Image (spheres, rainbow, N blue to C red):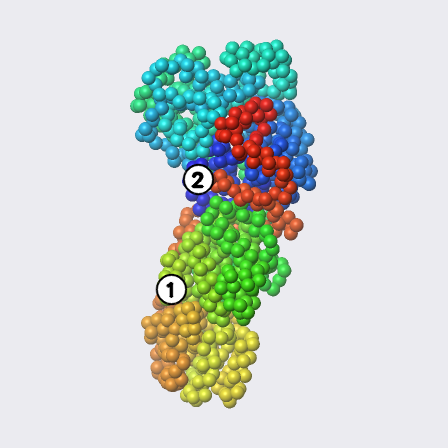
Amino acid sequence: MVGIDINLSMSQVGRRPEKVLLVAYYEPRNVPSIVENIALLQRLSSFSISVLNLAEHRVDSGFLKIPPVVDLNDFEAVVIHNTVSYNVDNLRSLDQAISGKLATFDGAKVILKQDEHFRFSEFISYASDVGIDCIFSIMPQNEVARTYGSSLPETTIRHMLTSYVTPSMRSRFNPSTKRPIDIGYRGSIMPLSFGRLCYQKRQIGEEVLQRLAGSELVLDISSRWEDRVGGEAWFDFLASCKSVLGVESGSGLFDVDGTLAARCAAVEGKLGADDGSRTYAEAYLAELSPLEGRVGYFMISPRHFEAISVGAIQILFPGTYTERMISGRHYFELAEDYSNLDEGIDLTLDSCRRNRMAAAAFEEVLLDKRNWIETFVEEFDAGLLFVLDSKGRRRKPVLVSEQPSRNVVLLQCHDFGADPRRDTWYAMGAPDGVLIHHLGINEAGSEVAIRKGPKSEVIVHVPRKQWAPGCLAPYIAQVAPNEGASRAVRELYFLAEALNGSDVSLFQIFGMPQRSPYAENFRWYLSYILSSALTLVDAISRVEGVHALVAINFPSLLPALIAKGLLGVPVIYEALEYWPEADPDQGEFARVFWRQLEDRLVRFADHHGTVSSPLARLLTREFGTQFYSVPNCTPTFSRSLSGTRPTTRASAQRDVRFLFQGNFAPYRGLEQLIRNWTRVDSRAVLVLRGPDNTFRQQMIELARSLGLCEFRVMFPPAVPTELLIAAAEADGDVGLVPYTPAGANYANCSPNKLSQYMSAGLPILANATNFVTEVVVSAKSGLVVDFNSETKLVEAVSKLCDDSFRQSCGVNALDYFERSFNWAAVSAPFYAAVHCAVGNSEETHLLFYQARPESNQGSRFNASSVTASASSIRVRLAHESITYKVLRRVWRSLPSAARLRLRDVRERVVRKPFP
């Protein structure tokens, strides 16, 4: 099948949370338009559609059945495709193998229906018995009252075409293509009980072939099953033809009252068995002629659109063609007595006239949006939403944003309040018309926490969910067409297998040393990645109105890529740290594994950023993908909240306070400071402020053991993030950035405190790390020394105790902050990525829906997703019978020609698909 060429970057902004099961039957050999229309319905719909392809998920060799692994209660709606509904026997057998029955299913029940002329009264009876809510019918609208009429008073009848124009069809037109075949055709041999129109599908080919026998025209005309063409070869065949024959779709014999079968049996009793001759066919149809045309069941067919798409003109019998084509302009009308066949041949051989007709048909029929699959998907969604509303199955949002905007959702595996960049800076600096919302994980509570930010952005934190087998099954089919999303799903399932494996398997898979002290730590990270991914995917699948996603750090990248497949929106990857070295204490085998995993996934994000230019260079080199850098710089409005910098504190007192504000943790150089503080200038007081934890207590004990009383080393309590600048102004004279260059993250760090100190007008004393050194040297805002050198550290402290030098550095720090080291000054690369991601898309509200009950968290089968090759995820059915396996093996062992002949016979008798 052809590739589906469509830009989905913004097509699923309105993806709804209701789950829809689409039951269909198709094989790769099917007519291309069938497979592609199903694929695009699934991809373009605002609903989450899982496609159950009964050509693969077969229970037995009888009429079609939904396999036992499917629970209808996992869905809000069931849609039966016309590839299944054409035969009422298929419909009646559908729910025989499942415990829940369609008649008692309280969700929306929708049927896409074609071939309504075939056993129509039985179909009406079925629809009434089951309680079908909506039928999308190809019935001409002026015939609906005469056919459906009062038979289904509770059922909505909506019109559709037999097929629709797809984006790939609109890209095929090429009038300059060489066309070696003058007239081509592939007809079909239909039962005579279907009436004269269906007989004409065969007759037109046979008659033209006979009349033009012996001419110099190149003809390729056949109605034999073995000459049928499928897949991409069908379009190649059409494109090789100057003109193609055809008739309307539909049937002149419409079995309204269910008596047609008996009448046909009477005719067969009178005439005998069909001998395949034209004489018999004409006699048979003459007997039924009084019944012809009682219902005008005639319409345009997929073949008409397909021929137009490749620039072949059409020679067609008279018809209405659903009022989509005009005789003489879009096609040549061939008289049913073939009296003007020569005129059609003249047109076929005249390249100028032929090309004008082909161009007119393309521009006025194929480019008519009434005929586009996109238009039908909108109508399908509207019809389904109407039914869900009427049955109370439409899921209502628990939160709606105050104003429409272009919505960017930031995904993070943390609670809100842990980091000002994530919590405040991104959202506050967003350009006009864009809101940056937060979706994170509520570690402490079991409820969804919802609040609003300063710009009315939505802040949602959901409780952490634990990974369980099959937990991503409801999403696999939906994301299958997206390479990055599929890769992320596969990687997560691989991690889950590894987590459940033994230490021996971890050695075999990851190279973890036997009896490694890092085993427990590594398993914790695997579990953390898995639970974070499940939690965020489950949450984002319940959000509507998303235009772009921001993934904060590597654990959020996997769910963001899956969400990209679900929503069809771009992903901005903000790697605020180098994940393989996020934990300096992990084993080397773990660092290698995380680096390889990130390398496999990072290319699927659309934009990539980090926090410092040295780290951006490292990540670009490691992963071969360009990273921009946006340092951690506090906004200028943060300083305005803190008041005016005191200038008299240091001169009024003898001490000079060297202030550290941040978390107490290893590799931050705090031990070095405390140990060396016994030798520094007596005026220097070390002030270490941060939240209490075990490491802070260890530092307090270390200071006491060295005889540094509370007047030389102080440990004041932490203050809220929004008060850090004010606290620095009040309590500090010099800002400390003591991080050691241990590992890539610390060596290339961009700590928040650097810009916070500079905003407070504090000079900087920093350990020698790459980016901090660049800033301090460029700003002339203090000193950078190697804290491992006691002598250099002591000298730097002494120099900063000098009032004149210290105050000069403080002035430079504040000036540098205001000019070039605040959020507004450095954040342009991130907002450029945001602008590129959301583009000029239409503003909309962000909606967040409540989770489904745990018992209905998703189907227990992986329904297929239609892709360019019509492949899908196969499921082994526990109830598949041995008899069916044997029959299927025998069937597939038959020669192709034999299978086609048997299929023809079977189609004539029961119109039921072979396995």
Q: Is residue 789 in sight in this rendering? A: yes
Q: Nearer the viewer, residue 336 or 146?
A: 336
Q: Residue at x 43, y 75 (%)?
A: 740
768 or 242, which is in the foreground?
Answer: 242
Q: Which residue is mark 1?
A: 618
Specify whether residue 848 is in view. no
Residue 645: percent from the left, percent from the top? 43, 75
Which quarter of the image is occupied by the N terminus? top left
Q: Residue at x 64, y 23 (%)?
A: 121
Per the image, the residue denoted by label 2 is: 4
Q: Secondary structure at mark 2?
A: loop
* Residue 655, numbered label: none
Q: Is residue 698 above or below residue 554?
A: below
Q: Residue at x 43, y 50 (%)?
A: 838
Residue 474 at what x, y percent from top left?
Answer: 57, 48
- The structure residue drawn at horizontal position 63% and vertical position 38%, both measured from the top left corner, is 882
Circle nearer the N terminus (1, 2)? 2
Task: Give the total number of marks visible in the rendering.
Answer: 2
Q: Nearer the viewer, residue 875 or 748?
A: 875
What amino acid type should be assigned to the residue bearing mark 2? Ile
Q: Is residue 528 above or below residue 201?
A: below
* Spot occupied by residue 17 in the image (x, y as percentages of width and height): 57, 46
Q: Amino acid at mark 1?
A: Leu
Query: Within 10 angstroms of label 2, few (less than 14), some, or many (20 or more) residues?
Result: some
Quadrant of the snapshot with the C terminus: top right
